[in-house]
Amino acid sequence: MALKDILIHVDNSKNCAQRLSVAARFAAEHGAHLTGLYVMTYPEVPQFIQVQIGQDVIEVQRKAVRAAAADAEEAFRKAVDAAGVKSEWRSVEGDAFDAITTHSRYTDLVVLGQFDEDDDGMVVGAGELADRLVLSTGRPILMVPYAGKFDKVGRHIMIAWDAGRLAARAVNDAMPLLEKAKKVEVLAVNPKNGDGGHGDMPGADICLHLARHGVNAQAQHIVASDMDPGNMLLSRISDEGVDMLVMGAYGHRRLRELVLGGVTRHILRHMTVPVLLSH
């Protein structure tokens, strides 16, 4: 699959410029069309409140929303002009989750920003937005952290491999990026030989598959019972200088992960590099 159609959710958050930079570079590298999507969500004001505050106040609120959309469009235009990519701007009204889900169905990749609870520029409900979109879009999602600069993404990629369906889906979705990477590592955390698809050497079979696509990947596995898999992945990312993680998302039911925790949820909260997630 070629990467030819990228959608980025644009908002007024502090980290949006970094997100735009990453998406624009990806579009340039792959000759892809980049669509910027901004969702204008107006405050829901009950009728009896509207009567009390008056239409003038409501119109001021609506003007503020439209002004924020104009600021976001200007930032998008600057990013795509600097990268020299084909682009399209869409500004729609409604619920962010519904809008992004609908527009994402017609793209190859969706770029989102990690939730930052201290940033008032993020859309309402952004804390759960990424979790829900991963499960609803049917498309791979590239999540860009709110902290840090990412001038190079996709040069050194790590694949979180558990030999399961979601990991296999993630590898397939990420293939256009893996084919352009300079270094690819396949990492199995606490694998059990012969269990769940792992052979005598965990990761060897998927590396062979990648090799047939021209991807020179190295298989590694680590065993450590005193650290949870999420922290193990983040630790190895730091140690190896990885600039992007590829992983399947929500291997257990999301409700179970919300209650008990899980690798997906941990990575979404504590990521240090952009992460491509597939479900």
Image: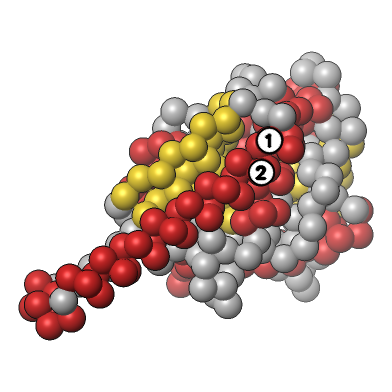
Q: Nearer the viewer, residue 27 or 230?
A: 27
User: Going by the image, does 103 lie left or right of 171?
Assistant: left
Residue in view at x 76 percent, y 28 percent:
29
Q: Locate residue 84, reporting x and y percent.
A: 71, 29
Q: Where does residue 229 sit, x and y in percent of width and height?
A: 71, 62
Q: Is residue 237 visible?
A: yes
Residue 268 coordinates in the image, percent (x, y): 60, 61
* Kind of residue sitting beneath label 1: Asp
Mark 2: which amino acid?
A: Lys
Q: Residue at x 39, y 56 (%)?
A: 66
Quadrant in which the N terminus is drawn: top right
**Is 53 rendered above or below residue 115?**
below
Q: Which residue is mark 2?
A: 78
Left or right side of 30 for 102: left
Considering the numbered disc 2 on the image, is that residue within a helix, a strand or a loop? helix
Q: How many marks?
A: 2
Is residue 221 visible in the rendered image? The answer is no
Q: Is residue 58 left or right of residue 263?
A: left
Residue placed most toward the observer, 255 or 151: 151
User: In the drawing, what numbered circle is on residue 81?
Assistant: 1
Q: Residue at x 66, y 43 (%)?
A: 78
Residue in the foreground of this view, choosing between 10 and 251: 10
183 vs 192, left or right, is right
- The Cα atoms of the two marked residues, 2 and 1, are separated by 5 Å
Q: Are marks 2 and 1 in contact (CB under 8 Å)?
A: yes
Residue drawn at x 66%, y 51% as measured from the top left: 19
Residue 68 x, y percent position in the rendering = 46, 59
Quarter residue 117 falls in: bottom right
Helix, strand or loop at mark 1: helix
Q: Is residue 7 above or below residue 214?
A: below
Looking at the rendering, which quadrant does residue 180 occupy? top right
